[in-house]
């Protein structure tokens, strides 16, 4: 099965690379009734809450930008396919000139380093939101073990890239027609990106949605991994509304199928139309 979906827009080639997939259980959506989840699954004719892990390539005339690097071997044998996806797209890791990390959760950054913590994309300038880098750069341990494990991985990735790391703020221009979009809540400096070229605009909204079957149908639903659940909820609702009303081409860090779609208002949420 193909690991890549490509969108050509103006002089940009945007490639969604599927690193792998997993299934979520009901307990990951605190504050949401199991019966409500079951109803949404039944409406979609499925019994499982599927997720994918996606990385993105934005090729422009002078550079090859990779956005996120997948979970490598941290999420089981069904993940870690980014290297195969890059090969399928005809891209060698050394061809990556820029690596944007949307946030420093392990399922987005582990693939940027080897299991021995050396850089995979040796030639890449690494772009990270300044609030995100500050949050995970704290010198003291988190009380919660999961957060502490994540902090240590984030710091290992930063050390692997050293002087190649550059920070940006807010909705920064990242060059070559790519802009960051600040999407705070999931993590303090969580962001996506957009590409405006020709007559199309594309938005990759990262982790405002982890489980499309639930959270597009009901954007009130949050996931346990949202650090500030209320801010994440407001960001999700506002961003999905903007994507629908502006008729942008949408993708995300955890979209399943379709990977590239427009959104239309439907009931309490949105339906996807593949493009
Ligand atoms: Zn994620």
Image: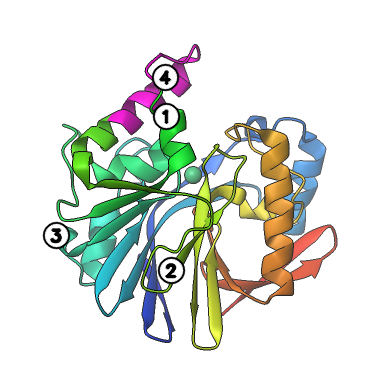
- Tag nearer the camera, 4 or 2: 2
In the foreground, 158 or 226: 158
- Tag nearer the camera, 3 or 1: 1
> Could you tell me how far apart the alpha carbons at marks 2 and 3 are, in whole angstroms?
21 Å
Residue at mark 3: 94
Secondary structure of the residue carrying tag 1 is helix
The residue under the point 55% across, 48% down is: 207
Highlighted magenta segment, given as a residue range: 139-155
Left/right placement of residue 151 relative to residue 36 reads left
Residue at mark 2: 178
Proximity of marks 1 and 2: CB atoms separated by less than 8 Å = no
The residue under the point 40% across, 73% down is: 14
Left/right placement of residue 216 relative to residue 17 reads right
Q: Earlier in the sequence, mark 2 or mark 3?
A: 3
Picture layout, residue 258 above or below residue 206: below
Q: Earlier in the sequence, mark 3 or mark 1?
A: 3
Picture layout, residue 113 above or below residue 211: above
Left/right placement of residue 221 relative to residue 196 reads right
Residue at mark 4: 148
Q: Main secondary structure of the magenta part?
A: helix
Residue at mark 1: 136
The quarter of the displayed image where residue 24 is located: top right
């Amino acid at each position: 099965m193909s690991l890549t979906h490509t969108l050509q827009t103006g002089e940009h080639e945007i490639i969604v690379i599927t690193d792998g997939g997993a299934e979520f259980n009901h307990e990951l959506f605190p504050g949401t009734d199991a019966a409500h989840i079951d109803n949404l699954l039944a409406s979609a004719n499925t019994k499982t809450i599927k997720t994918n892990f996606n990385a993105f390539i934005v090729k422009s005339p002078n550079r090859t930008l990779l956005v996120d690097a997948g979970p490598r071997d941290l999420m089981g044998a069904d993940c870690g396919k980014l290297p195969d996806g890059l090969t399928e797209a005809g891209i060698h890791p050394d061809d990556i000139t820029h690596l944007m990390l949307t946030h420093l959760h392990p399922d987005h950054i582990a693939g940027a380093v080897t299991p021995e913590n050396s850089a995979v994309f040796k030639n890449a300038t690494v772009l990270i939101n300044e609030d995100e880098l500050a949050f995970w750069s704290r010198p003291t341990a988190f009380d919660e073990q999961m957060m502490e494990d994540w902090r240590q991985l984030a710091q290992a990735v930063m050390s692997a890239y050293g002087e190649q790391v550059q920070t940006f703020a807010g909705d920064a221009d990242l060059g070559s027609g790519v802009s960051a979009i600040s999407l705070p809540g999931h993590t303090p400096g969580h962001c996506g990106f957009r590409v405006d070229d020709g007559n199309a605009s594309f938005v990759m909204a990262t982790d405002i949605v982890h489980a499309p079957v639930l959270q597009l149908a009901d954007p009130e639903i949050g996931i346990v991994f949202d650090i500030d659940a209320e801010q994440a909820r407001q960001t999700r609702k506002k961003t999905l509304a903007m994507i629908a009303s502006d008729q942008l081409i949408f993708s995300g860090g955890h979209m399943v199928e379709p990977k590239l779609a427009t959104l239309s208002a439907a009931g309490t949420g949105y339906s996807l139309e593949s493009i």
